[in-house]
Image (tube, helix red, strand yellow):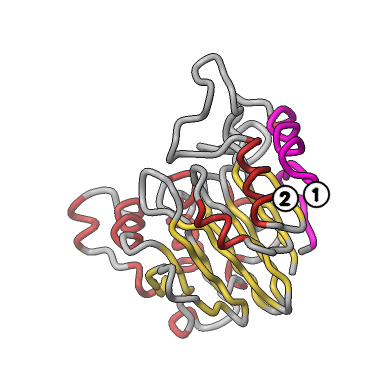
């Protein structure tokens, strides 16, 4: 397995990277975990969007799904697709509201929405924590995590290797359980543990660098990769926090970088 970072900036694109989006190569499978602002352009540096086998959306905040309408346009209107586009819809595993949410983003007016159907391009599947999904031979498991909207962490397994992606979450036991023994935990670290505003981060939103390290240690993962750092915080400081809490390998990811799983 291999992870390629399309974007890793928290809360929206930053000056050095798009928002959240990750390409996972698992055997013959090519799937994207989230497709936030700017990630569709980055994807095309690594893969023809027609070659995707599936998309999994952890939740429906724009910084994790805003480029989905652009993907629809690409797959619907490209003049010379590599195969008959009517015979292959792209599987999209996402929270139940995804069809309505993405249709509204694609067709903003009520009149246009009434005539818009994305099902010719996208094959929606509801993401559920008790229902693992197979995407081109890769197994994807989901667990509900702590965030203001319906949100999931994901575990991708293939060939005896495992990658867990936190999505957006505050501290929670579900992430530790899902990540137990994983080879790699790709975990958000969105803010410092202590700031001028708080002595401990607000609950149920995001994690600090320290909390990401604590979750990696509790789950016994092999390696911790930090992501989702907003442009107004110092990634190096969050990395230092995580290293104090987790004694395994820790790295701050960067856009366009690849990581072996």
Where disc 1 sits, the SS reads: loop
Considering only vertical position in the picture, is 106 above or below 132? Answer: above
Task: Give the mark nearer the N terminus: 1 vs 2.
Answer: 2
Mark 1 or 2, which is nearer the eye? Answer: 1
Q: Quadrant of residue 190?
A: top right
Residue identified by numbered label 2: 224
Q: Which mark is residue 37?
A: none
> Does any portion of residue 80 appear in the rendered image?
no
Considering only vertical position in the picture, is 20 above or below 54? Answer: above
Q: Is residue 36 magenta?
A: no
37 or 193: which is nearer to us?
193
In the image, taking residue 225 as reference, residue 134 lies left or right, namely left
33 or 129: which is nearer to us?
129
Residue that appears at 48% across and 79% down: 85
In the image, taking residue 161 as reference, residue 100 lies left or right, namely left
Q: Quadrant of the N terminus?
A: bottom right
Where is residue 191? Give x, y as percent. Answer: 58, 30
210 or 122: which is nearer to us?
210
In the image, taking residue 254 as reference, residue 168 lies left or right, namely left
Residue that appears at 50% across and 76% down: 133
Where is residue 65? Give x, y as percent. Answer: 46, 52
Region rendered in magenta: 236-260
Residue that appears at 60% across and 56% down: 165
Residue that appears at 40% across and 69% down: 128
Where is residue 162? Give x, y as percent. Answer: 68, 68
In the image, taking residue 171 as reference, residue 18 lies left or right, namely right
Q: Is residue 254 magenta?
A: yes
Do residues under tags 1 and 2 come within 8 Å of each other at their CB atoms?
yes
Residue identified by numbered label 1: 248
């Amino acid at each position: 397995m291999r992870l390629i970072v399309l974007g890793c900036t928290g809360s929206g694109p930053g000056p050095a990277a798009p928002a959240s989006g990750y390409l996972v190569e698992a055997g013959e499978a090519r799937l994207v975990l989230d497709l936030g602002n700017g990630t569709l352009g980055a994807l095309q540096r690594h893969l023809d969007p027609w070659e995707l086998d599936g998309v999994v959306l952890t939740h429906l905040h724009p910084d994790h799904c805003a480029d989905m309408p652009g993907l629809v346009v690409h797959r619907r209107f490209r003049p010379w697709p590599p195969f008959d586009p009517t015979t292959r819809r792209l599987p999209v595993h996402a929270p139940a509201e995804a069809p309505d949410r993405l249709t509204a983003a694609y067709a903003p007016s009520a009149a246009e929405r009434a005539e818009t159907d994305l099902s010719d391009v996208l094959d929606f599947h509801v993401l559920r924590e008790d229902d693992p999904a197979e995407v081109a031979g890769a197994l994807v498991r989901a667990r509900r995590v702590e965030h203001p909207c319906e949100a999931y962490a994901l575990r991708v397994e293939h060939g005896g290797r495992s990658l867990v992606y936190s999505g957006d979450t505050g501290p929670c036991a579900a992430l530790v359980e899902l990540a137990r023994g994983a080879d790699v935990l790709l975990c958000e670290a969105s803010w410092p543990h202590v700031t001028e505003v708080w002595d401990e981060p607000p609950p149920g939103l995001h994690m600090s660098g320290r909390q990401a390290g604590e979750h990696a240690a509790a789950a016994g993962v092999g390696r911790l990769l930090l992501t989702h750092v907003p442009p107004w915080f110092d990634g190096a400081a969050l990395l230092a926090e995580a290293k104090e809490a987790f004694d395994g390998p820790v790295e701050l990811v960067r856009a366009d970088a690849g990581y072996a799983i």
